[in-house]
Image: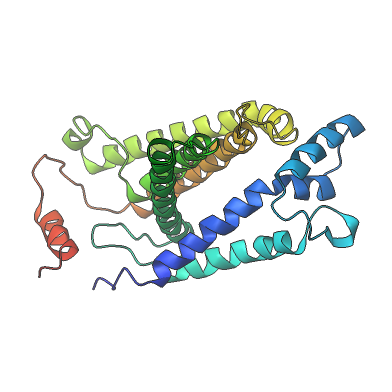
Amino acid sequence: MQKASGSISEWLIPLAFVATVSWLVWHLPAFMLDWVPYTSDSLRGQVEAIYLRADVTPNLGGIFGGHIDIVDIAALILAPVLVFFGTRSVQPAAMEFEGASAIDRVALFIGRATMMVIAIMTVVMLYEVFMRYILERPTEWANEMTLWFASFTFLTSGFYAMQQRSHIRIFLLYDAVPRWLQRVFDCISTLLIVTFAFFLVYGSYKQVFVNKLYKWELYGSAFNPPIPATLQPMVLIVITLVAVQAILNLIQDWNKEPEIHTDEPDQEEIDALKRAVGQD
């Protein structure tokens, strides 16, 4: 039986998670300056200068004389707590695939958080339109903020799409072969995904984490957000999650009955559509 979906906690928790993670990302240099040793004083001074210009709570003072303040610590503790309760409270919608593993529920929760990011982007764009064309006072940050959020949305949506089995697939040959050969195709596709993820992480780890994140590379605009320093590590993190999810999909779908994919909706899809619009 399909569980009820759409409770207020399913939206408030992802929204709080987005706000918490946004704070942690913006203040990530504080954690690096306090916890990561820097190879040179000049590089440390460069990152420290960037952080001091962007610090949202400069008057709080760092804990034990460092850069991390009490709000940063609270956000760091709150983020995994929100993930825990978010994955427990999220319920799949009528047309969503739930899955059986913990990472499946994480993917569902990330999907909800991604929806919140899209809503935030919409508000930011509407605000910019109002400021630019009504008050004639355009902002310096709205365009880069939207670009930043859109990039995270693109990445996390890929993880969610893999969990939902909604990525693009061509079934012309797949549907024409017996089930044992379909399993061979599934193994090959999963192996290709894992191989791609491995070599992407292996080949770009140093470039991403040392030259981008470690140096806290900025975008170079008037707003100057740390888009290169945050997005490139996120690419490696998400592709790793996608590879893990692909392996879990292979295991979970191993004993599934063969499916015939057509352009016409089957009875199960019709029933799911009816449940989605509240019809029996």
Instruction: Look at the image and tell me whether residue 69 can be seen.
Output: yes
Instruction: Give the image quarter of residue 199.
Output: top right
99 sits to left or right of 78: left
Report the quarter where the C terminus lies: bottom left
**Is the residue 117 above or below the residue 135 in the image?**
below
Q: Measuring 34% from the left and 61% from the top, which residue is drawn there?
A: 98
Report the quarter where the N terminus lies: bottom left
Report the front residue among 61 and 244. Answer: 61
Circle count: 0
**Residue 89, horizontal then vertical, whole percent:** 43, 71
**Is the residue 3 above or below the residue 166 in the image?**
below
171 sits to left or right of 235: left
Instruction: Look at the image and tell me whether residue 40 can be seen.
Output: no
Report the front residue among 221 and 171. Answer: 221
Report the front residue among 163 and 60. Answer: 60
Instruction: Give the image quarter of residue 182.
Output: top left
**Is the residue 63 above or below the residue 56 in the image?**
below
Report the colour scheme: rainbow
**Residue 6, horizontal then vertical, whole percent:** 32, 68
**Residue 130, horizontal then vertical, whole percent:** 39, 43
Q: Measuring 22% from the left and 52% from the top, which residue is drawn there?
A: 257
1 sits to left or right of 23: left
- Judged from this view, the residue extending furthest toward the front is 135
**Residue 105, horizontal then vertical, whole percent:** 43, 61
Q: Measuring 71% from the left and 35% from the top, which residue is drawn there?
A: 216
Q: Measuring 66% from the left and 31% from the top, which residue is drawn there?
A: 218
Instruction: Give the image quarter of residue 51.
Output: top right
